[in-house]
Image: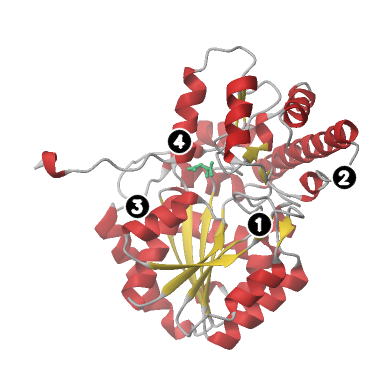
């Protein structure tokens, strides 16, 4: 049987992790996988996470199964963190999932169950695993223009022109904040126009929000998701706790299905629970319990918010330093977009050959499409990167 298996294409981001590990140059710089690192290159366990884990260890009396939707306290806390009071809780069906990827996967499966002919519109570019999962599930993908490599911003005209091709029942996948891989984001006026285009066509938005708190702050980063949820009849939201709680390996995510018609809540909730049961039965609980412990305790929540804000500001500071250094070395403003981008990533906008040269000649690792993880830098390595960029003729 196994001899019938074909080689699968390597995941470009994960492959880069392995290449970086194998490089023995002490000066190497990892700007690959989307994991936050502090100035010492460490991905720390956040203070509030440590405290919550300690509390759970001391107080938890059972490891018996939770429900198929996960711990209800986690669902409530996360719905509130992402959606605030944009919609009534009774209009939101929600299930815990293994990470944000689990939420994305379950969302695609729900779409396919409800409307097997649905086409999924995705930004060009998008997170490669969106495309990989959609292909694996045999779903039709249509890409819409998104990134303007001339300006480093959003090609909003191109995006709106491509959304004119939407038909009723199509799904539009959007990044709630901190677009991965480009770092370029819609402003609120543009979000309103996108919502109007989707509503006019009868298309359903699906929002992937994996970096809430990494862009302009916890509330500002949720503003677009909240506006969408309050404006459209139905939408799907896949949220991740991997980055903003720093609990990557605990696999903690939430899928929300919002309907203005609360009469649909029971059947939607039932379908989400069914999908969990088919794929892995009960979702993982540890990370979810850490998150709900933090979000429901005033002290832990305040400490988590303060540490998250430090993380956000440190990335913003590195962006500004990099843009200023490149301005100085190039004598031009052509890298100013790096300071305007938000979140963990920026697409530098150079060729695959130049990305390879940076890796070969300077030990600088970024994804082949020139996506850089800004958190992989520190104050000392920013000038090294800037010089390598200019020396490579970018
Ligand atoms: C990334 O984009 O680097 C992260 O979301 C990690 C991953 O799973 O790809």
Residue 59: x and y, percent? Answer: 46, 37
- Left or right: residue 335 versus residue 350 is right
Residue receiving disc 2? 333
- Left or right: residue 122 versus residue 146 is left
Report the disc number at residue 177: 1
Q: Earlier in the sequence, mark 4 or mark 3?
A: 4
Q: Nearer the viewer, mark 1 or mark 2?
A: 2
Q: Nearer the viewer, residue 40 or 133?
A: 133
180 relative to 205, above or below? above
In terms of secondary structure, where does tag 3 sit? loop
Q: Are marks 3 and 1 in contact (CB under 8 Å)?
A: no
Quadrant for residue 190, please give it. Answer: bottom right
Q: Are marks 4 and 3 in contact (CB under 8 Å)?
A: no
Q: Are marks 2 and 4 in contact (CB under 8 Å)?
A: no
Q: Are marks 1 and 4 in contact (CB under 8 Å)?
A: no
Q: CA distance from mark 2 to mark 4?
A: 33 Å
Q: CA distance from mark 4 to mark 3?
A: 32 Å
């Amino acid at each position: 049987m196994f001899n019938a298996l074909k080689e699968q294409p390597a995941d470009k981001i994960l492959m880069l992790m392995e290449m970086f590990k194998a490089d023995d140059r002490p000066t190497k710089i990892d700007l690959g996988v989307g994991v936050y690192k502090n100035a010492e290159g460490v991905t720390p366990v956040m203070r509030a996470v440590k405290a919550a884990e300690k509390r759970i260890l001391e107080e938890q009396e059972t490891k018996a199964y939770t429900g198929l939707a996960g711990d209800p306290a986690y669902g409530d806390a996360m719905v509130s963190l992402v959606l605030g009071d944009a919609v009534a809780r009774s209009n939101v069906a929600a299930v815990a999932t293994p990470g944000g990827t689990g939420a994305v996967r379950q969302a695609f499966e729900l779409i396919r169950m409800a409307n097997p002919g649905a086409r999924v519109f995705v930004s060009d570019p998008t997170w490669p695993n969106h495309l990989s999962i959609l292909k694996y599930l045999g779903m039709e993908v249509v890409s819409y223009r998104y990134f303007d490599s001339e300006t480093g911003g959003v090609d909003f005209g191109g995006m709106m022109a491509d959304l004119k091709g939407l038909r009723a029942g199509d799904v539009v996948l959007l990044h709630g904040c901190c677009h991965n891989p480009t770092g370029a984001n819609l402003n609120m006026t543009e979000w309103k126009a996108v919502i109007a285009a989707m509503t006019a066509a009868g298309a359903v938005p699906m929002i992937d929000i994996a970096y809430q708190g990494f862009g302009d702050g916890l509330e500002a980063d949720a503003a677009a998701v909240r506006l969408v949820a309050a404006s459209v009849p139905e939408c799907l939201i896949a949220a991740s706790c991997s980055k903003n709680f720093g609990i990557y390996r605990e696999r903690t995510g939430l899928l929300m299905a919002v309907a203005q018609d609360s009469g649909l809540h029971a059947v939607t909730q039932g379908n989400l629970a069914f999908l969990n049961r088919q794929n892995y039965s009960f979702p993982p609980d540890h990370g979810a319990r850490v998150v709900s412990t933090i979000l429901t305790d005033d002290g832990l929540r305040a400490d988590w918010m303060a540490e998250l804000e430090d993380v956000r500001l440190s990335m913003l500071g590195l962006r500004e330093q990099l843009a200023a250094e490149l301005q100085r070395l190039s004598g031009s403003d052509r890298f100013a977009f790096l300071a305007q981008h938000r979140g963990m990533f920026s697409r530098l906008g150079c060729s695959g050959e130049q990305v390879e040269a940076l890796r070969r000649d300077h030990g600088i690792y970024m994804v082949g499409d020139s996506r850089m993880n800004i958190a992989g830098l520190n104050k000392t390595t920013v000038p090294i990167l800037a010089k390598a960029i200019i020396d490579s003729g970018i």
